[in-house]
Amino acid sequence: MIDLPKKEVDVLVIGSGAAGAISAWDSAVKGLDVSMIGVGTPATEMSSGCIRFNDDRSVPEGLGLDRGDLEDAFSRAERFLIDEMKTSGLKMEGARRDQGRYYRCHGTIVPENIVQGPTSSGGLDRIEGERICVIGFEDRTEFDHRLFAKALAQRSDLRVEHIAVGTTNGVLRNSSVDDLLDMFVDAAGSASGEVVFVPPFISLKDIDRWEELEKRSGRKFAEPVMDLGMPGARLRDALISSASRAGVSITNGASIVGMSISKGSLNEVTVRSGHRLQHIECGAAVFCGGGLVGGGLGVSGKDVIDPLGLFDVRYLREGDGIDILARASSGGIRTGPGLEAIVDGEKVRNLFVAGASLPGMNIVEGNGIGDAMATALLASKAATEASR
Amino acid sequence: MRGVDVMLLEKGDFCSGSSGGNHGLLHSGARYAVKDPESAKECVSESRILKGIAWNCIEDTGGMFVSVGKDDPGFADVFHDACKATGVRAARSTAKELHQVERNLSDDVADGFLVDDAVIDPFRLVLTNIEDARRHGATVRNHCEVVSFERSDGHIGEVKFKDQRNGSVGSVVPEVVVNAAGSSSGSIASMVGGNLAMTRDYGTLVVFSGKLVSGTVNRLRPPSDGDIIVPSHTSMIAGTTSRSISGPSDARPTIEDKELIIKEVSEMVPALRGARAIRAYGASRPLASGSSGRGASRTFKLIDHEEGGVDNLISIIGGKLTTYRMMAERTSDAVCAKLGVRANCTTGEEVMEASRLDEAVTLVSASQSESMRRRYGHVPSEMMNVVPVGSMGVQSCSCENVMRFELEHYASSEDVITIADLMRRTRAGMGYCQGTGCMWEMASALSDEGDIDLLIRDFVRERREGSSTVIEGDQLRQEMFRSHLLWPFQAARGGEER
Ligand SMILES: Cc1cc2nc3c(=O)[nH]c(=O)nc-3n(C[C@H](O)[C@H](O)[C@H](O)COP(=O)(O)OP(=O)(O)OC[C@H]3O[C@@H](n4cnc5c(N)ncnc54)[C@H](O)[C@@H]3O)c2cc1C
Ligand SMILES: Cc1cc2nc3c(=O)[nH]c(=O)nc-3n(C[C@H](O)[C@H](O)[C@H](O)COP(=O)(O)OP(=O)(O)OC[C@H]3O[C@@H](n4cnc5c(N)ncnc54)[C@H](O)[C@@H]3O)c2cc1C
């Protein structure tokens, strides 16, 4: 192991998913010196990039957070999604639906709303027209256009056709955006649909070419909500870009392996990257390591654990039945009241937890990115105060 | 095969009863030699026959019986004598010799025997039988449940059945009815007013990802819980338990079953404790004798209901998967006697036909044909009609290495209506991720047949039932990941089943 020179920061953010990025951004725009360190692919990037803000606040409220503070954090997170993401190049669009507000990138369409058809009220995405064309790749590396077309046809009275382009494996990955654009414009030309669905393929840096696609073919284009693909990657890129613009120093591929805590206060964090170790002294830290999928939480046997072996972890096993998944979703790092982490039964005054690492914040029970961002804003506020 | 016009009705998919819920051990007879010599002898002759006629369904792995530390040392002699008396081949071996065959055996293994056990794929076996029966002219229908019998003067007339595909009710008027409804045989008999004394004995099995054994490993002691490990395709299956049940509601694996199995089998192969359990399943043994549990004989019983007042009903109950052919032979002998048919049974000699593709014209890659050979016993020629021209096409299930054309081939069959039906035929979805990705591929291949949402929901429910008993550690995280992937889908369905 090689020891790197010690560093000092005001606020250290651990994890660079949605919670980490917005938390780091928030502290940085308040003028603090912020570092964000993350490793691996965050759940944020695997997600469909479709963000739900549930009206039901019972999960974050259950963490002992003040209702008024929460409302404030939720509306700031929504504003961030609209204004700040736009500056980063990502045009987020939202709409109110039955139990909350939903946001996703311009062009992404939630098939659920198509079910409700063009005339339904309150739908996020109205399809103007009656005919739809779904374009996909013959070898369906990431998007099965036939299944999607079939599902659309089954769920609505829209007329759906599907067209396959490309036949070589990995065409999505190996072709340039120009090639793909040409291919889609060509294929759309032979379609009768007014709305054309294509697999999510435009990355953040090429996002304006969506308009070009529509102009050249004279049709409206849409991409389906899809996880493990471009929509999530785009969202993550935009989040990182916002944090970076705000002056956050970002390290990827390094993990926090230890923390030194004494007398209820965090003094130093140990970071490992390959065979290098670095000690960072920080005024405050926010742990946004994610949940069971992001890596911030792990499982040993049937217990939800924190892989660092540091925090107190809450795991609600009450209730009968064998639905262990629901119980595992309720696990997470113990805090509070508020978001101060609890270590060895004691609150740590300058270490906070946000996002999917918190108890109850994991899907299936929790609410995903929206709640992650709102709690992250509360944590950054507390961290900003504690670091002073 | 004997010239009789036959119709087979199955209420679920083929092999969805006990035949699809068992251990897949083609018994050499050794397990029954001591306490159930009659069963042992049946297994000796039948396992030899099956290795010939059902070659594509069997992996002739061999097996062993091992005694562990505290086991009664006197049992080995009793076992050896019983094997000799019943004609079961068993070669006495030292701990060192056994370790040479199975490297993961416990250091506590004292000694044991090498035996002729093998592994049989029940799905493949049943499907091969169905194909062969159809080739011989039988009418075979799955997803068709027998719902009523018309009976007058001690004779069954019309039999009504409901087709699950569209809810329609069909009927036949058979000369003879064979009741081979496994653990439902009792209720079938009582539908006709007949009576059938049988017990239902539930057994649990646990599937682990990966293989730590190359052949079957049995405990050298009188048959009890958790004493067998069977390697199967990409996994291994450990079991079993024995619990008498009264109805279908008790017929499911429990956490206690699973823990007992892991505790017991890991005494033979300790590394099993660290292996990833992916699923628990089980079935009930339809036992012929009045007693239940381990004491009950595993031999079978043929009942002619003539004495009970129904002159054209024959029930066949009990037995083993290993002895299924012999049971069928006795049954069809009885049917032929009733019909006055004189032809002999030839199932013991005629190899069941499987349409194999000549090696020279194999279109798929070497690794793919190896995978297909493992799963189907051969590369099925009729499947090659759907291989996309000029390419191998897309891989749909990476755990089990199943290609899209395989799914499409089976999806086009009238027998296949659910994702689980496709899974039973191809093994897509049986691996450690339990269909996380290939479930969509299967739905896509089937989407001309049914409602995609229903297809997916049924499959998720079925898989979850099997995994909920075992999920922990890595498998729990795997299931969490799967829940995330399903979340938009389920949310889109109005939040049900969340
Ligand atoms: C397939 C999928 C689909 C989803 N779909 C949706 C959806 O449609 N809508 C929705 O709202 N939500 C969805 N979610 C859930 C949502 O993605 C998460 O709830 C949310 O992104 C959590 O954000 P986070 O910032 O808390 O954690 P993450 O995004 O997981 O980020 C945590 C990061 O911290 C890093 N980390 C962990 N430990 C350490 C350490 N010791 N040192 C350094 N770094 C560390 C991890 O590597 C990871 O990069 C989905 C999730 C998945 C997996
Ligand atoms: C846990 C366990 C492990 C086992 N391990 C082994 C082993 O390793 N080796 C071995 O040789 N044997 C083993 N066995 C025994 C073996 O599985 C059974 O003996 C055998 O599968 C029974 O076959 P069957 O055809 O009689 O019954 P089943 O396979 O149950 O077939 C009966 C069929 O009838 C159908 N049916 C029921 N009612 C109706 C109706 N009204 N209309 C139409 N169809 C209907 C059912 O859906 C079912 O598919 C094991 C059994 C259990 C329970």
Image: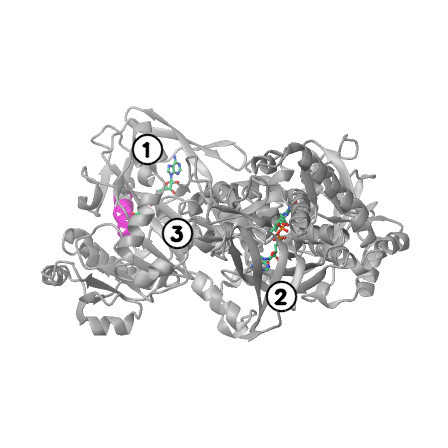
Which residue is denoted by mark 2 in the rendering?
Answer: A253
Query: Does the closest atom of ligand 2 sit within 8 Å of the Cβ of label 3?
Result: yes
Q: Classify residue B59 by image quadrant.
A: bottom left
B191 displayed left or right of A128? left
Q: Is residue B327 magenta?
A: yes
Q: What kind of residue is marked 1? A: Gly
Check chain identity for marks 1 and 2: say if they share one.
Answer: no
Tell me residue B292's x, y (percent).
21, 40
Q: CA distance from mark 3 to mark 1?
A: 25 Å
Q: Which mark is residue B394?
A: none
Q: Nearer the viewer, residue B137 or B188?
A: B188
Mark in front: 3 vs 2: 2
Which span of residues is magenta-colored? B319-335
Give the total of numbered labels: 3
Which residue is denoted by mark 3 in the rendering?
Answer: B126
Q: Is residue A141 visible?
A: no
What chain does badge 3 belong to? B
Query: Does the closest atom of ligand 2 sit within 8 Å of the Cβ of label 1?
Result: no
Q: Classify residue A173 by image quadrant.
A: bottom right
Mark in front: 3 vs 1: 1
What chain does badge 1 belong to? B
Q: CA distance from mark 3 to mark 2?
A: 51 Å
Check chain identity for marks 3 and 1: say if they share one.
Answer: yes
Which residue is denoted by mark 1 in the rendering?
Answer: B247
Q: Is residue B26 magenta?
A: no
Q: Secondary structure at mark 3?
A: helix
Task: Identify the mark nearer the N-term, 3 or 1.
Answer: 3
